[in-house]
Amino acid sequence: MKILILSNYANGLYLFRKEVLEAFREQGYEVVISVPPDENSRKLRELGFQVVDTAFERRGINPVHDCKLFLKYGKLLKEQKPDIVLTYTIKPNLYGGLACRMKKVPYLVNITGLGTAVEKQGLLGKILICFYRAAVKNAACVFFQNEGNRQFMTERGVGKERYRLLPGSGVNLQEHPYEAYPSEDEGIIFVAVLRVMKDKGIEEYLTAAERMKEEFPKTSFYLVGEYEEESRKTYEPWIGRLAAAGKLKYFGHIDNVPEVMAGSHVIVHPSYHEGLSNVLLEAAACGRPVLASDVPGCRETLQKGLSGLTFPARDTEGLIRAMKTILTYTESDRREMGICGREYVENVFDRQKVISIYLEEITKQINR
């Protein structure tokens, strides 16, 4: 049996879903992965998976380019002849789902987040909802990663007949063990791990870091994550200025994010929207208190006041208030918040639960 995976980003599959892919293989399934080519594709190949480079623009809408993507997926289905297809992220969900529907190939759709256009409910959002309804109409199952996204979409007729809630991508509790809380003798380190783009809250974080560093000189602010190319021109000079002034340490894209988290004291995630934040799950897994925007996909990952604090999305002042609040706590308080977060993800977000749900749905299709 062959499973075809359609996604928009190789590194996302590698970081958050490789255990799922390996579980498929252990069950005897052949796994083929279709993603846009980049430097991260080799990680999946090194794990022994067949990777088909499928170039497309991850963001934005271009009717010509998107039509080509739909045709590419149709050709891929014809060439690979998969028994079932699993799609992740918006364009693979839409164009891959529609291609599967037309080719009558069983498929499972994972809505990992809604995106700004859908959430704003303008003309473009309404068009995308109609497209989603058509694309997932015959899906064997539509997975949602949080109840807010599920309610929003099913109320608009997307996936309402066959859906399941997943605990996001879950977290590998062995790869992300609890790490002892570091000493605060040299000051408290805040770190944000995000793709450098507006919707991830980068503007709020940079502004808050600059102002907090001036008011609380012993605090430090780290930023981990790569630029989205369309955002580089806007944010690279800003980040460079803060780094040169000693107000921010920018790591760029790194493969040792858990190590940076373990050396920090508070993880900040100011995202505008999420399916379910892997960053926050991994922060809690290593035992760090979190500050997160109060949106679906973030709020579910913490217990407010126990393992972290929330603040309104797109609200710099709210983020600063949350930072100041957690600074009023004792070192012991912050350590205990991290321990509480670890216990919470152990109970709710173990990645093995995600794997079991996928295998259950795939088995249903095999036995039909």
Image: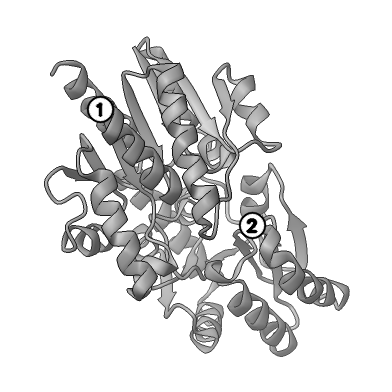
| Residue to which mark 1 is pinned | 104
Q: Position of residue 283 (x, y in %)?
A: 51, 54
Outermost residue, front direction? 64
In the displayed structure, does residue 96 sit left or right of residue 146? right
Q: Position of residue 121 (x, y in %)?
A: 32, 74
Q: Position of residue 327 (x, y in %)?
A: 56, 79
Q: Position of residue 133 (x, y in %)?
A: 24, 52
Q: Residues within 10 Å of mark 1 (few under 14, many from 20)?
A: few
In the displayed structure, does residue 207 sit left or right of residue 243? left
For this rendering, which residue is in front, 53 or 130? 130
Q: Looking at the image, what colour scheme do you see?
A: one colour
Q: Amino acid at mark 2?
A: Pro
- Location of residue 119 (image quadrant): bottom left
Q: Residues within 10 Å of mark 2 (few under 14, many from 20)?
A: some
Q: Residue at x 55, y 57 (%)?
A: 59
Q: Residue at x 46, y 36 (%)?
A: 71
Does residue 246 appear anywhere in the picture?
yes
Image quadrant where one finds the N terminus: top left
263 vs 176: above or below:
below
269 vs 256: above or below:
below
Q: Residue at x 47, y 48 (%)?
A: 285
The numbered mark at residue 182 is 2
